[in-house]
Image (cartoon, helix red, strand yellow):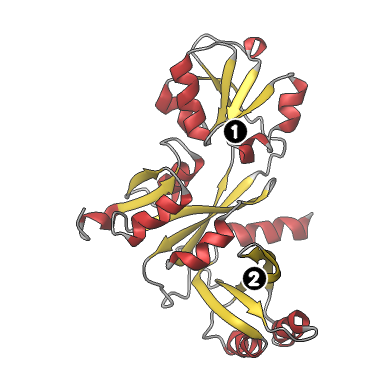
Amino acid sequence: MSQTESQGVIAFQGEPGAYSHQACRHYRPRMEALPCRTFEDTIEAVRGGRAELAMLPVENSTYGRVADIHHLLPESGLHIIDEGFVRVRISLLAVPGATLAEVTDAMSHPVLLGQCRGFLRRHDIRSLVGADTAGSAMEVARRGERSLAALAAPLAGEIYGLDEIASGVEDRQNNTTRFLVMARQPDFSRRKNAQGDGTMMTTFVFRVRNIPAALYKALGGFATNGVNMTKLESYMVDGVFTATQFYADIEGHPEDPNVARALEELDYFTSSLNILGVYPADPLRAAQLRDQAQG
């Protein structure tokens, strides 16, 4: 595929009908969605020029962060240019004519199985691990067994000809997955989202220097400069307990004076600092803050 042909393509991990596919349809409806087998394949599709963008899930409000993503992003060579939040509505999908009472086993990705524990327990349904959500729906359609169902998006049921025998089976009704849109080149030029909101997000990873209280000192600049840090996570690198990398999201743009000062102070106490992307905040962030304030 030529560079020109890849301009209208967005890659995602999973089979057609996956939640990542749903995210592509919602946030890039005019682009062709390219299914990929793994997250690595999804990233490589963009790096290799087969796709213009990649849609990658990073965290779920019920299950937590998506395994491996935080390790892959810093090494991907790609840049975050947008974020998006997809409400995860989970359906139990079975072959046409099957009933809920007949289902003994439900197949899905481990992340999704973890979001439906209550439903599975109430109906005495065993969980089976599948490669991904849409792939599980495809497998259920292939087997044609009335006792086997898939936990997936309604979109997967439409694609693979399955009946939706139960809907909204997720344990929490605010179940949401955050996605990042990745590109080969960064975009620091924007200052507003499509709705005109000027809140920007900056995502970066860093490692602190080997000095006492390094993390405390490194983060002090964000507090003193009034920069809101919305996420801070640590994870091991290279399988070594003493090698820790931190992943952070902050509100603001690196060119904002207070953010620039905070990052300068952070840089002084770190052995490495890599900005992964600068992008408009999804409007759902502001909506959630309003809901919390009203609650």
**Where is residue 36, by image quadrant?**
top left
* Callout 2 crowding tier (Cα within 10 Å): few <14, some 14–19, many ≥20: some
Answer with mark 1 or mark 2, whichever residue precedes in sequence.
Answer: 1
Q: Residue at x 43, y 61 (%)?
A: 182
Q: Residue at x 36, y 67 (%)?
A: 184
Given the image, on which type of amino acid does mark 2 rest? Gln
**Disc 1 versus disc 2: distance between alpha carbons?**
33 Å
**Quarter holding the C terminus?**
bottom right
Q: Residue at x 68, y 84 (%)?
A: 209
Instruction: Note whether 265 is above or below 43 in the view shown.
Output: below
In the image, residue 42 lies at what x, y percent? 41, 52
In the image, residue 39 lies at what x, y percent? 47, 51
Q: Which secondary structure, mark 2?
A: strand
* Callout 1 crowding tier (Cα within 10 Å): few <14, some 14–19, many ≥20: many
Given the image, on which type of amino acid does mark 1 rest? Ile
In the image, residue 218 lies at what x, y percent? 71, 84
Number of numbered markers: 2
* Residue 245 numbered mark, or none: 2
* Residue 220 numbered mark, or none: none
* Residue 90 numbered mark, or none: 1
In the image, residue 259 lies at what x, y percent? 60, 84
Q: Which secondary structure, mark 1?
A: loop
Label 1 or label 2, whichever lies nearer to me, is 2
Q: Taking 178 as reference, is 138 left or right?
A: left
**Where is residue 4, by image quadrant?**
bottom left
Q: Residue at x 62, y 23 (%)?
A: 106
Instruction: Note whether 188 is above or below 264 in the view shown.
Output: above
Instruction: Note whether 110 is above or below 235 in the view shown.
Output: above
Instruction: Note whether 219 is above or below 59 in the view shown.
Output: below
